[in-house]
Amino acid sequence: MNGEKGILFTQGNEACVRGALYAGLRFFAGYPITPSTEVAELLSEELPHVGGRFIQMEDEISSLCAVCAASVAGDKAMTATSGPGFSLMQEALGYAIMGEIPCVVTSVQRGGPSTGLPTKGAQGDVNQARWGVHGDHAIIVLTASSVQDVFAMTVEGFNMAETYRTPVILLFDEVVGHMRERLDMPEPGELPVVERLRTSVKAGVNYYPYLPREDGRLPMSDFGGVHRYNVTGLYHDIWGFPTEQPEAVNKLLYHLVDKIEAKAAEIARWKEYFLDDAQQVFVSYGSAARSALHLVHTLRGKGIRACWNCRPSGRSRRNSCATAPRGRATSTWWK
């Protein structure tokens, strides 16, 4: 599969696997759960072919903990799950946010709460993606409405994880994950791939794992390598050691939020159709975006100037809804 080229007819979950391998994935830990299981199944076959490692863990929280460990040790790492498993991952997700550990968490959404409807699509993990972790934080969440976009957003997810040293959530759904359609595989190098930014500090010289460069990025040193440092879920200083000093805590919290919020314009992705003359605007994401676009075409066929704005990705902060005067636009957006 890795390096395969041309036009494929494939499933959304398989496109996620192909995108992850394209981006340089080398470690996966997970626990099978419908409707994301195909991601784990395919990676168990494909990762050994590229020198990677696959581990089936005993549960979801241990899966994300293993992913965090693999990432700080130097590998691009990810896991995949669905609603119930995503709930179990929240503590480890908070650890990854606080420890600034780049990794990717794929949640292929299904009906809930609890066991819910394992084989049916839903979009019920949106609030959990934003607010599942307690405390002040920012998070990047990407979604997709087609198999092609699943591939592209998976590559983007790894790139953003490395760029901003943060976990990134790929919030797909059962419909997109299980449907099959055309995938145009890009050539190697056709899509940009962000590699791990490693420190230039030599062995024997003090390395500060949480001291940002002027551009805000944090170079990493493979844990267990030439530098000794600490990774913790506690508030910490530039060495990674726990602190309760108000100034250090304040700087850390602002850093964790601002490194994403200040880059929102660079992070956000969307597609627009027929906005130039629209009087009604539909904003949607995931598999529902396909129905919204179909509705726009139907309305325009009846002379109603509707348009469609799909949000395949963006920072997840808070949900706002505005209703315009009658006959004008009604929209929901991420802000």
Image (cartoon, rainbow, N blue to C red):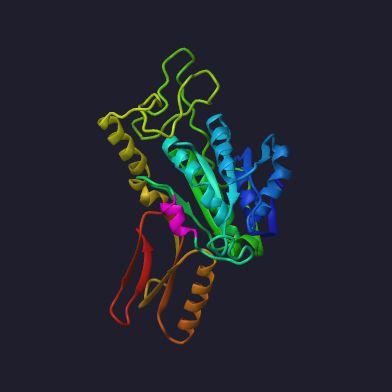
- Give percent across and percent down for residue 28: 63, 41
- Please identify the residue farthest to the front as the structure is shown: 114
Q: Viewed as shown, does residue 287 lie left or right of 94?
A: right
Q: Quadrant of the C terminus?
A: bottom left
Residue 127 among magenta residues? yes
Quadrant hosting residue 116: bottom right
User: Relative to 92, is 129 above or below?
Assistant: below
Residue 118 among magenta residues? no
Count of labels in the image: 0
- Give percent across and percent down for residue 206: 41, 16
The answer to which of 148 and 227 lies nearer the viewer is 227
Quadrant hosting residue 176: bottom right
Please provide the residue range marked out in magenta: 125-132
User: Relative to 322, is 37 above or below?
Assistant: above
Q: Is residue 186 visible?
A: no
The answer to which of 174 and 19 lies nearer the viewer is 174
The answer to which of 173 and 197 lies nearer the viewer is 173
Q: Main secondary structure of the magenta part?
A: helix
Quadrant hosting residue 318: bottom left
- Give percent across and percent down for residue 298: 50, 82
- Give percent across and percent down for residue 207: 42, 20
Q: Residue at 60% across / 66% down in the picture?
A: 117
